[in-house]
Image: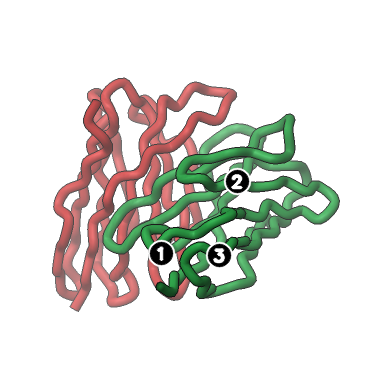
Amino acid sequence: AQSVTQPDIHITVSEGASLELRCNYSYGATPYLFWYVQSPGQGLQLLLKYFSGDTLVQGIKGFEAEFKRSQSSFNLRKPSVHWSDAAEYFCAVVPNTGGFKTIFGAGTRLFVKA
Amino acid sequence: KAGVTQTPRYLIKTRGQQVTLSCSPISGHRSVSWYQQTPGQGLQFLFEYFSETQRNKGNFPGRFSGRQFSNSRSEMNVSTLELGDSALYLCASSTGTSGNYNEQFFGPGTRLTVL
């Protein structure tokens, strides 16, 4: 069955430190890959997406993610975290066979220490 | 361009009642998807509508239903509410062009509490 795993339920980093959020997926073919961010009481905002091509993708707010086919991973990174980055982050996949059924990971809650 | 709007933002119901949630997509978008978000199950796909037709469906009981109108606005209905239906219900819209994935834009959600 298709699945998305985010192994870290929560992560705490100091402001200015680097960040890496992990995501692994299980799917027969390379699906479309996404990272979303959700602030408290808000909907989801798309940070970045990977469809094909260059395996390092740049997103908004200084985030980037690297697709590694051999590891079925799509980890999210940011070189320097800001206090405003504190939120919940979701990795998601959409099978590239048509349709819009998005499968989300369980999410990683990011806490930022001053 | 206005974003995706959902009404109401908050709702309190009691077990056994039914509820209707509304979603207005971004102007020009023809696809509307619904998701349920709970602490225990996370974000789960409910269904997707395109041009008034249900195109995709998740694994939810028949108590959960939806529809889409000719102006692309969508409603979802939950009948015979259970405590476990308490959740944040998110709506997402996209252009919905067949054959290709189009970015989904999410609304702020409707927080449903079942007592």
Above or below: residue A82 compared with residue B68: below
Residue at mark 3: A17
Above or below: residue A46 compared with residue B112: above
* Residue situated in front as seen by the camera: A97 or A53: A53
Q: Residue at x 55, y 65 (%)?
A: A17
Q: CA distance from mark 3 to mark 2?
A: 15 Å
Could you tell me which chain the residue with mark 2 belongs to? A
Q: Earlier in the sequence, mark 2 or mark 1?
A: 2
Secondary structure of the residue carrying numbered label 3: loop
Q: Earlier in the sequence, mark 3 or mark 2?
A: 3
Q: Residue at x 59, y 43 (%)?
A: A94
Quadrant containing the N terminus of chain B is: top left
Residue at mark 2: A64
Measured as percent of width and height from the top left, residue A28 is found at 78, 47
**Amino acid, disc 1:** Ala
* Labelled pair 2, 1 in contact (Cβ < 8 Å): no
Measured as percent of width and height from the top left, residue A108 is found at 52, 67
Measured as percent of width and height from the top left, residue B36 is found at 38, 59
Secondary structure of the residue carrying numbered label 2: strand
Measured as percent of width and height from the top left, residue B34 is found at 37, 48
Q: Residue at x 59, y 72 (%)?
A: A8
Which chain identifier belongs to the red chain? Answer: B
Chain A: colour as depicted = green
Q: Residue at x 71, y 32 (%)?
A: A52
Badge 1: few (under 14), some or many (20 or more) residues near its Cα, within 10 Å?
many
- Let me know if marks 3 and 2 both belong to one chain: yes
Badge 3: few (under 14), some or many (20 or more) residues near its Cα, within 10 Å?
few
Q: Earlier in the sequence, mark 1 or mark 3?
A: 3
Where residue A86 is drawn, which disc sits there?
1
